[in-house]
Image (cartoon, rainbow, N blue to C red):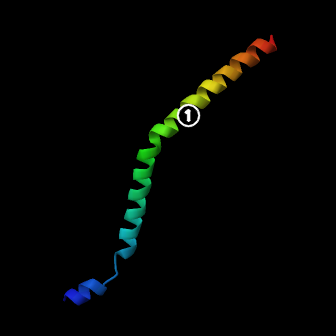
Amino acid sequence: MIRKFWQDQRGQDTVEYAMIVAFIASAATALSPAIAAVALHLGRSIGVLNAALAVTAR
């Protein structure tokens, strides 16, 4: 019975996909502060560029 259970591979794909999803979720959680900082910096840079273009367009 234990040998049959050990050799049974029906569900192996599901476990592998679950592990991939867990890895992606943990990586996204770990990187979210860095991504937020980059997005904030880009937003500020775009705001500065828009202000500079508005001044030069007058």
- Residue sitting at the far right: 57
In which quadrant will I find the C terminus?
Answer: top right
Residue at the image point whose x is 60% and y is 28% from the top: 43
Asked if 16 appears above or below 57 in the picture, the reply is below
Q: Is residue 57 left or right of residue 14?
A: right
Residue at the image point whose x is 38% and y is 63% from the top: 19
Q: Position of residue 35 (x, y in %)?
A: 51, 39
- Residue sitting at the far top: 58
Q: Which residue is mark 1?
A: 39
Report the amino acid beneath label 1.
Ala
Q: Secondary structure at mark 1?
A: helix
Residue at the image point whose x is 56% and y is 35% from the top: 38
Q: Is residue 52 left or right of residue 39?
A: right
Q: Is residue 34 left or right of residue 4?
A: right
Q: Position of residue 56 (x, y in %)?
A: 80, 14
Please tell me in which quadrant of the rendered image residue 24 appears: bottom left
- Residue sitting at the far left: 1
Please tell me in which quadrant of the rendered image residue 7 appears: bottom left
In which quadrant will I find the N terminus?
Answer: bottom left
Judge by depth and name the residue closer to the eye, 14 or 44: 44
Q: Residues within 10 Å of mark 1 (few under 14, many from 20)?
A: few
Count the marks: 1
